[in-house]
Image (tube, grey):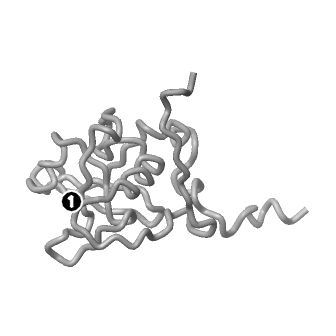
């Protein structure tokens, strides 16, 4: 059944759950970076977009023109349709847990509330977003007293 599958190994840092630095210095994402980003994000990072990673381009969260590196931790998979939104007022960034957030332009949302896509990661639907990657302070102190 898996004869047609493309097998790959994704290596992640055990402390931060971030993909290891691949050391690429080109503007376009390398095939290796695309494989790691596919394993990490699954598809388009725009909120509620169901496009798979094979249909995605890679957007620099810190723009290439502003000195942004072409590193897997600075790339966001985005389908072609949503990639144009990054040039029309939408901002893209990584939050403190490494997830990609999209901030709408002020004319659309005056508070610029960050939005993430959980379509490709259904396990995140059932986890508290702050507890998913939080390792410190566990178990809570009120449970430890006993």
- Seen from this angle, which residue lies furthest bottom? 67
Residue 79, by quadrant, is top left
Q: Quadrant of the C terminus?
A: bottom right
Residue identified by numbered label 1: 91
Q: Residue at x 49, y 63 (%)?
A: 19
How many marks can you see?
A: 1
For mark 1, give the secondary structure: strand
Q: Position of residue 111 (x, y in %)?
A: 23, 57
Q: Position of residue 59 (x, y in %)?
A: 24, 57
Q: Residue at x 36, y 52 (%)?
A: 34
Q: Quadrant of the N terminus?
A: top right
Q: Position of residue 144 (x, y in %)?
A: 84, 64
Q: Residues within 10 Å of mark 1 (few under 14, many from 20)?
A: some
Is the residue 92 above or below the residue 70 in the image? above
Q: Position of residue 58 (x, y in %)?
A: 26, 53
Front-most of 47 and 64? 64
Is the residue 78 above or below the residue 1 in the image? below
Residue 54, by quadrant, is top left
Q: Residue at x 59, y 56 (%)?
A: 131
- Seen from this angle, which residue lies furthest front? 3
Front-most of 93 and 9? 9
Q: Residue at x 33, y 66 (%)?
A: 74
Residue 23 is left or right of residue 79, and the answer is right
Front-most of 136 and 43? 43
Residue 112, by quadrant, is bottom left
Front-most of 114 and 142? 114
- Seen from this angle, which residue lies furthest right? 146
Residue 127 is left or right of residue 138, and the answer is left
């Amino acid at each position: 059944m898996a004869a047609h599958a493309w097998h790959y190994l994704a290596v992640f840092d055990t402390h931060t759950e971030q993909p290891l630095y691949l050391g690429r210095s080109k503007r376009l994402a390398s095939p290796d970076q695309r494989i790691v980003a596919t394993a990490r994000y699954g598809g388009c990072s725009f909120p509620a977009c169901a496009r798979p990673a094979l249909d995605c381009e890679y957007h620099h969260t810190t723009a290439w023109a502003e000195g942004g590196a072409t590193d897997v931790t600075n790339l966001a998979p985005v389908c072609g349709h949503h990639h144009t939104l990054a040039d029309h007022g939408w901002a893209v960034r990584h939050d403190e847990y490494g997830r990609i957030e999209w901030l709408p332009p002020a004319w659309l949302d005056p508070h610029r509330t960050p939005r993430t896509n959980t379509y490709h990661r259904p396990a995140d639907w059932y986890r508290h977003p702050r507890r998913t990657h939080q390792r410190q302070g566990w178990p809570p102190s009120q449970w430890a007293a006993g």
